[in-house]
Every structure is written in C-alpha cells, then in structure tokens.
Amino acid sequence: MRTVAKGEFTKMWTLFFNLVSILFLLFVECKADFVYNGLEDAYLTFDGAAQVADNGLLSLTDQNNRYEIGHAFFSGPFQFKNNVSSTPVSFSTTFVVAITSEYGSNLSDQGMAFVIAPQRGLPGAQANQYLGLFNDSNNGKSTNHVLAVELDTVYNVEFDTVRGPHVGIDIDHLFSVNSTSPAYTTNGKSKKLNIISGEPIQVWIEYDGIDKELRVTLAPINVSKPNVPLLSLSRDLSNLFLSSSMYVGFSASTQTVLTSHYILGWSFTIDGKARPLNLSDLPQLPQPLQQPPEPPQPKKKKKMNLLLIVVPIIIVLTVLALLISICVYYKRRRNRKHMEAPPAELVPEPREMINNARELNNWPRNFSYNELKEATKGFSEEEDIGRGGFGTVYRGVLPNSKLQVAIKKVSCDARQGSKQFLAEIASIGKLRHRNLVTLFGYCVHEGQLLLVYEFMPNLSLDKFLYPKRGSLSSNLDWSKRFHIIEGTASGLYYLHQGWEQVVIHRDIKSSNILLDAQMNARIGDFGLAKLYDHGAGSGPTSRVVGTPGYIAPEMPQIGIPSTETDVYAFGAFLLEVVTGRRPNLVVERGLGLVSWVLSCMKENAILNAVDPRLGGEYVVQEMVLVLKLGLLCCHNDPASRPSMFKVMKLLDGDANLRSLDRSDDAPSDFGTAVRESPSPLSSVNTASTFSASEASPSGIREVVTY
C-alpha cells in the first residue's frame, strides 16, 4: 500500500514537472519578439564604435575614424532550434538601414550585415573586408555557426562574385552562398537600388522552418514590401543553429573611406511574422556631408543659375523678416497687457492629485517666468550646468529670497515632455526626505515647462566617478562612497515603503544621485516615476524606459515596473560605486559589469573588482558586503532580490546575507552563492545560471540630471 502511494506520488510529480516545462516553453516562445521604432530604449549590447544617439538612431560606425568595427546585439538570447525535433524554427525580421560616406553616393567603403551568432560581440572579428564578422583565421570554419545577410557596398576580390555593391547570404564564410546586386520589384518591374545613397532602405529577412527556405527582400522606405524577394536560399539550417540559445544583431566595418552605418528601426520574432515598423516614428538621419564641387559651368549659364538661386532667396528672406516683425510686435503688445496664465491642459489641478484639501498648502509654488529668467540671467550659457531628462538644467538665484536653485527647462517638443513634467510635480511635489531633492515649484510659459529645485553644489555622483579633467575622484574615498550608498538606500526605501503611496523611480543611476555641500546623497530626476497604492501593483508600460545597464532583465519581456526593478537598478548602482565602472559598458573579457563582478566572486577574488583609485584603503567587510549585496540585488529572479527594508538592515549591520531568503521557492543557485560565501575574501564554486543584462549603449552623458 505504501509502495503504491509512493508510485502515485512519483507520477503526479512527473506530470507536474512536464506541465511546468511546457508552460515555460510556451512563455518563452510567446515572448520571443520585439519591435523598436528608434532604438533609444532598445535592450541592446554594444561594442566597438556602435552607439545610440539621443533621438534613437543606432550608428554601428561613424565618420570619425577609419578601420572601425561596430556591433549591436539584442542582449537576450533566442532559441532557433526545436529542442524536441532538433529542427530549425521559423524566424522573421525587418529593419531600416542607411549607409553614408564622406564622399556621398559617389564612393563608399565596407558594408554591414544582419547576424545570428552563438555569442554577442563576435570576439576576434576584424574590420576591412571581414565586415566585423570573422578574421583571417576563422573565416570559413564550420565551428563559427554564424548566419549573416550582408549589405556590402564594395567589391572584394577575395570573397565576392558580384562587382560593386551587393546583397549576400553568408554561412560561416564571407564567400556568399548566394548574392546579387541590390534591387527591388514594383509593378512587376525590377529596379536598381543604391544602398550607399544615404537614403533609408527597409530590409526583410524571413526563414521558413518547414520549407527550409531563407528569403531576403529590399525596398526604399517609401515603397511597400515587394512580393518577389531579392534573394532566396533553400537550406536546412539544423546544423548551423546550436541547440543552445543564439543571438541576433548587426555588424559593420570600415576601411579607408569614412562611412556611417545606421539602423533606424528593428523588429524581430521567432516562429511568426515580424511586427511592422511605424515608419513615421523612426528617427531622423543626420544632415549629409557637403558633396564635392561640380565641374565649372559656362559663364552665361553660371550667371543665369546664380540669378535663379539668389532671387528666390531674397524674396523668401524678405517675407520671413516681415512675418518675424509682426510676431514680435504682437508678442510685446500681449506681454505689456498681462502675464500669460499657464495653459490649463498642461498644469495639473492640485485638487485632482491631492486627496485632502488641507494638503493644498504643501503644493509646490507656481513661479513667474520673468522671475526665473532673471534668476538665470536670461537662461545664459554660463548658468547652464548640464542636461537632465527632457531638458537643460540651469543654476539660478531667486531675485527676492536670494535662494540658490536649479531650474530644469523641460522640452515639450514631444508629448512625453508634458507627461514627464506632470509626473515630476505629481510625485516629488509632496515628497519630503533628507535623501531626496526638494522641489520648490514650477512654471508654465508659452508651452515651456520649468521645474525649480533645491541646488546641489556638488552636482551629481557621476562627476566624481568619471571626472573629465582634474581629480574629483581623489576626494571620493571609501567612507564617502559608503555614506552615499547608505543615503541612496534610505531615500529609495522611503519611496518604496515610507510614503503614503509606492513610488517607483525607474531610473536609479549615478547621474541621478545628486550631492549636497556635505556630500549627502539626494535622489533626483523623477520624470519616469510611477505611483500606486500599497498592496496594489503598477500596470504594464507601453515601452521600456530607464538607462540600459540598470534595467532589470525581466522588463523587456513583461514591461511591468516594480520595486524589484528599482532594486535591480540599485544593485547595478552599488557595483558602479564600488568598481568605478559604468554598468552599461563592457568591462573586461567581453562581460558587462554585473557578470564580471560575479566571475570575480566565483574565482575567489571578489576584491579584484574594487576601484583601484581607492588605493586599497577601505574596510574589507563593508566592501565585500556591498559587492555581494549588489550582486544579490541584480539577481535574474525578481523574487530573489531583497527589499529596500532588508537592504537598509544589512547596511546598518542589523542583518546578514544568510537571513535574506525571501521565500522557500526562490532559486538558490546565484543567491545562495552570495549569501553562503565562507569568508569575506572568497566565494563558493557554484554552477550559476545568472546572466545579468549587459546592454551597453555608449554616449551616456556625464551631466547633471535633476
């Protein structure tokens, strides 16, 4: 009887395990897609010259250096092979690309490629004709397991069969298995396509896992997808795709001609059709470089052309000057009559946001525009102290009180600017804590939104961690860093658990930690904050926001911000303060900051991650605690991250890492390794499934963000 019961229990457990496995596979499968109309918030990992501009334009290379390589890969892996049948799955992608050179469309250099590879970054790849994909020793080896669709702009005699620009399908080798000149079909006719014109071109790449056919289609951005593909290849990719996960991304290289390779938007999906891009939302390309001068024209023709150019310009300038004069006249007349009242649709009604009417006295002050203009000397450049979210930050002195303030002039070019302005007033307006920046008031003037903050004389923490010149970091010893960590933790604990509502900051990072005269940490920039009642939860967001490197790995999949996602960002911040390295960049050995610190811990050398500028002068127990706490906060499983209450107890010495288990169901691979390290100077050797976000867009500005 006992044996039967045990057997039944085994069957039930097996059934349960299989059911969970199936549900997990379905979950992964349904999440295996993304679409980015502009890549400013894309979950990407970069190396080489690749970077994303403020407007979301991804440049793989730029026109500043020759012999460059640029890689941009989606940070998460995808399963390209069915684990049960070992057959390749279908996939589909579309992206918009533009290639420009210093000589315009007359001459270009090497091209770029869409890539599927076993790892991000393609280590060891060379520039020049290798397109950043291979090098002279591994080109052609079947162990590469690389599929690439290249858009090459020049003819390379050792690899190419098509003279001139071409599109090719590469499998482990730069000698394309199929290639042709770029073209597209419209109304039944084939038209040539100039891929070095600098104009945006849309590319579609689709693989049918059933028919085993790969199709590549191109068209100008203003032309619908042609019914006839440019290239097709019948090939079973079972041997190419590994059973383990693989990565998708882009690679480009340059040689002697300065060339820029841009990606404006990107959509990708597994086992389905890639979602279409919203072409109207794509970022603008930079202005093209000036073309070489044309041959001299005959004198009479040249004189006539000059008249045709000059006369319209004079007419346009005259009309423009007249319109400007009229506008200035009416503007001055209106300002003499009265001070413009803030537009009702932009200024939030305090009673709509404050439940108790008695709290109206705590609502931030509404400053006049003239008062703020006088405080900043007309918003002069000498008072410009940096850029914050959606605008510029100025230093100012209020004319009446002589109070020194920081004034953020919020840009309203986009609808998000107004949302950000309202979010800051609604959230930080009533918050009061010693580790939060105080909001004094706001102003709305002719569509321009302004926020008035307490001024922080030491600006932001990133100025000390990454000084441009001088040695600010020499003043940031370990005691100051630990004090800043404690203050930031205290402020974040207040946001999560100490106020009447839960406030999720969503952008904790060193440039948003401001420092007062005593080097106390103050959390600033609440433009991305979300509020909800205790016991409730925040809803999903329309897009992933924050700074790559600090974004929790679950955010691109579920899109629901939480206190746990703030804790992840705080963990990345801890590691940043200790190591002096940015979380959004590749640190060493091709690893992001979190993965690198974790590897140091596994090698029993966690103190190797400490910022060498500290010169070994620190409290070892505190240092090890902060490093391990940072790793624990960056756990892949949100349920395994400690709450800010527990973080505070740890930093205050009222708890230890062994007491941080949140639930019996939490995974124990990485978390246990952190909690149960036998000594402060070593860590246990555990098999870890931890793979933190390593997204690393370059160009993060070292600026003040209030």
Image (tube, rainbow, N blue to C red):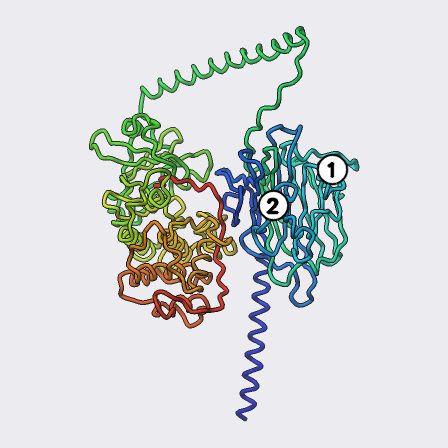
Quarter holding the C terminus is top left
Q: Quick one: 579 or 9, which is closer to the camera? A: 579
Residue 425 drawn at (x, y percent): 34, 42
Asked where in the image residue 681 lies, by quadrant, the reply is bottom left
Looking at the image, can residue 273 be seen?
no
356 w.r.t. 289: above or below: below
- Secondary structure found at label 2: loop
Instruction: Categorize mark 2 by other alpha carbons within 10 Å: few (<14), some (14-19), many (20+).
Output: many
Q: Which residue is mark 2?
A: 126
Image side of residue 413 versus residue 102, left or right: left
Residue 105 image offset from top left, x and y in percent: 65, 29
Q: Residue at x 39, y 18 (%)?
A: 330
* Quarter-of-image position of residue 340: top left
Q: Sequence-wise, which precedes: disc 1 or disc 2?
A: 2
**Count of labels shown?**
2
The quadrant where residue 312 appears:
top right
Query: Given the image, on which type of amino acid does mark 1 rest?
Result: Ala
Q: Name the secondary structure under disc 1.
A: strand
| Relative vertical location of residue 314 with respect to residue 541 in this rendering, above or below | above
Instruction: Say which of 309 and 109 sits in front.
Output: 109
- Outermost residue toward the left in this view: 401
x and y, in percent, of residue 629 in the image: 36, 61
Dot in front, 1 or 2: 2
- 702 horizontally vs 401: left or right: right
Residue drawn at the location 66% of the way across and 7% of the way down? 299
Spatial CA span between label 1 and label 2 = 28 Å
Residue toward you, 342 or 311: 311
Q: Is residue 438 at all visible to an observer of this figure?
A: yes
Residue where numbered disc 1 is placed: 183
